[in-house]
Amino acid sequence: MDSPEVAVARYAASISLWALYVSGGALFVSACVFALELRRFFDEGVRLTMSIMPDARLFGGVQDVSNAYLSVTITNRGSAPTTITHMLLYDYPSRLAQYLPRRLSGWTRKQRPQTFVINPIGAPGPLPYVLQPGHTWLGMAIQNADLERMIEAGRLFVGIIGSHSDKTLFRRVRRWKPPKDAKAA
């Protein structure tokens, strides 16, 4: 038979081992909850994606074969609605100017882009437009000779301003070029 001191020591060791297992389990559960909350933080809210199509032509009900359009499609893939307030075009004077932060380009007006506010044509409605989660908005601008020149220079960007953020959603306008090994029609 063990002395009372040894029995108390064994009991204390078993309790401390059990407490270590419980605290390890609690640490695992809290780490999993933190990971789920972090995922929810990044997945919730507004998540806009933009696709741009230069040289778009209207087909179907509206017969407008004389104009080409710059078409912009915005999709809200998030879980919250937002209001699209502006569609902008930015024409940068040089390749370097498009990478300069606004604070550095402030010292010279030559490096600032020309900014154009577009009154878009298209569906589902005019701006400002409330874009619900899972829905799209299509904006179009008539592609005239000046816009054609900006696209060819490769320094034209489309910007979308929404009520959900202070930042503008930017995308560079690029023409699609078929791969070199594609068959000619």
Image (cartoon, helix red, strand yellow):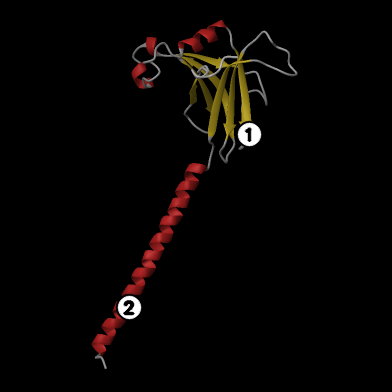
Q: Quadrant of residue 77?
A: top right
Instruction: Please rate how many residues cluster around mark 2, counting C-alpha atoms within 10 Å: few if below 14, some from 14 to 19, many from 20.
Output: few
Q: Is residue 121 left or right of residue 90?
A: right
Residue at 52% in and 16% down: 175
**Looking at the image, residue 44 lies above or below residue 131:** below
Foreground residue among 142 and 101: 142
* Quadrant in which the N terminus is drawn: bottom left
Foreground residue among 79 and 148: 148
* Quadrant in which the C terminus is drawn: top right
Foreground residue among 139 and 180: 180
Q: Is residue 120 left or right of residue 172?
A: right
Look at the image and tell me whether residue 59 can be seen: yes
- Secondary structure beneath label 2: helix
Q: Which mark is residue 3?
A: none
Coordinates of residue 83 in the picture (x, y in percent): 59, 31
Coordinates of residue 14 in the picture (x, y in percent): 32, 78
Residue at 44% in and 56% down: 32
Q: Is residue 147 left or right of residue 63?
A: left
Earlier in the chain: of badge 2 and badge 1, it is: 2
Q: Are marks 2 and 1 in contact (CB under 8 Å)?
A: no
Q: Which mark is residue 135?
A: 1
Residue at 68% in and 16% down: 58
Coordinates of residue 102 in the picture (x, y in percent): 38, 21
Look at the image and tell me whether residue 163 can be seen: no
The image shows a total of numbered marks equal to 2
Q: Which mark is residue 14?
A: 2
Q: Quadrant of residue 105?
A: top left
Instruction: Please rate how many residues cluster around mark 1, counting C-alpha atoms within 10 Å: few if below 14, some from 14 to 19, many from 20.
Output: some
The kind of residue tagged 1 is: His
The kind of residue tagged 2 is: Ser
Query: Disc 2 to disc 1, how far (Cα)?
Result: 59 Å
Coordinates of residue 9 in the picture (x, y in percent): 26, 82
